[in-house]
Amino acid sequence: MNRRHFIYLAGLLSLGISCSALPVLRMKPVLRLKDPAGPDDLPAHIFYLASLAPSSHNTQPWFLQRQSEKSWLLSLDQKRCLPAADPSCREMFLSLGAFMENLLQAAPLYGCDASYSVSSTSPLRLRIGLQPTGSLPDETQSWLLKRRRTLRRNLLPSPLTAAEQSYILGDDRLSTFFPRASTAGQTIAELTRTANQNQSRNPAIQEELSRWIRWQHVDQQRFQDGLSPETMEMDFWLKWLAEYFIQPKDVLSSFFQKSSLEQIETQVKESAGWIICRSSSEQPADLLETGRRMEALWLRAAAHNLALHPMSQALEETGCCQQLEKTLALPNIQFLARIGHCAAYPPPVSLRRPLKNIV
Ligand SMILES: Cc1cc2nc3c(=O)[nH]c(=O)nc-3n(C[C@H](O)[C@H](O)[C@H](O)COP(=O)(O)O)c2cc1C
């Protein structure tokens, strides 16, 4: 090899290494923050675990104000609501209820008694009290709150056993499981298809969704909320494309809409069946209570390695929702999700805002 060949080859080699190393290095996922609280800051540990609750589009619509050493006010952060997809804030109250359920389950793990009361005036506010009981913290039990996640892909078609069904439903009389192949299961799948098709033609809903997708690492790091390629369970190459080439406005393109509908088609054919959670009325306080039951059910499912994937579109489209409630003869359906076994229950990947931005 002469000198000219050597320089040429060395140049090509270093260009190749830098081109392939750069994306690989930057493809390291942004990780969810660990519990940041010091050992004595019991409320901070509890609020951290509460913030691991699910929320629609991962908007994390909770806002806490400290009132005294032992009491806080929890309210809905209006800037984090979804006026196009969820104009009545139904899903936001469910998310706030999930936050409360986590908080109530977390408090005893950190030696505290938690209590709350709901304001009767509008807007809805919750007064939360945390009283140390003197018992020693036992944070080993926090694993379940840290483990729960949404799983959107590869739910297995195997049916749930009778024992699994009765465990996940517990004594929740307003929640029901429908096997996928049942008439009710097929109706839910059909209405979910229709609702997704309607929404793909609704620019307001699509624009709102695009505002909550964090395609790039820099946005994931900056906002620590919303949906990321990681949470949407994209494969490596799609994630790579998302990092370098996909823009928020691409969500509105016909190519994106077509692939989303294809994915919905696959999803409604997977899983063991559907879970629905109902409320006793449409009042915010009842929606909050339904959010608590929804999260308690989701945690029981996670404890048994059962994947859960909410699919809210049929409830967001008024016509589909009315038809669903009429066909199933069940009023006030607030939450709809696919449920099923999964080959593995991977660790959660959705991000959470730091506590200082919540409290
Ligand atoms: C009320 C509610 C409705 C939701 N609706 C959907 C949905 O329609 N489609 C979906 O993929 N995920 C849905 N989710 C799941 C959220 O996107 C998810 O909880 C959030 O991204 C946080 O991720 P995690 O559950 O893994 O912590 C919903 C969650 C809640 C609480």
Image (cartoon, helix red, strand yellow):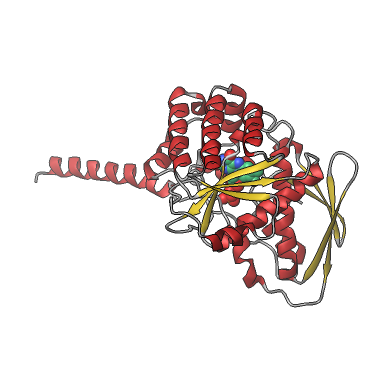
Please provide percent x and percent y for residue 5. Answer: 13, 41
Split into quadrants, the picture shows ligand 1 in the one at top right
Instruction: Examine the rendered structure and indicate whether residue 234 appears above or below residue 341.
Output: above
Which of the 4 image quadrants contains residue 45? Answer: bottom right
Q: Using the rendered image of the protein, determine whether residue 222 is visible from the camera's viewpoint.
A: no
Instruction: Examine the rendered structure and indicate whether residue 142 appears above or below residue 189.
Output: below
Which of the 4 image quadrants contains residue 12? Answer: top left
Residue 116 versus residue 269: which sits nearer the camera?
A: 269
Which of the 4 image quadrants contains residue 238? Answer: top left
Please provide percent x and percent y for residue 296. Answer: 67, 57
Instruction: Examine the rendered structure and indicate whether residue 66 appears above or below residue 241.
Output: below
Please report the residue visible at 54 percent of the width from the left and 55 percent of the height from the top: 348
Please provide percent x and percent y for residue 109. Answer: 71, 70
Please provide percent x and percent y for residue 236. Answer: 38, 45
Please report the residue visible at 58 percent of the width from the left and 45 percent of the height from the top: 337
Query: Position of 320 compared to 127: left or right?
Result: left
Residue 315 versus residue 94: which sits nearer the camera?
A: 315
Residue 176 versus residue 297: which sits nearer the camera?
A: 176
Query: Position of 306 compared to 109: left or right?
Result: left
Query: Position of 261 compared to 299: left or right?
Result: left
Q: Using the rendered image of the protein, determine whether residue 15 is visible from the camera's viewpoint.
A: yes
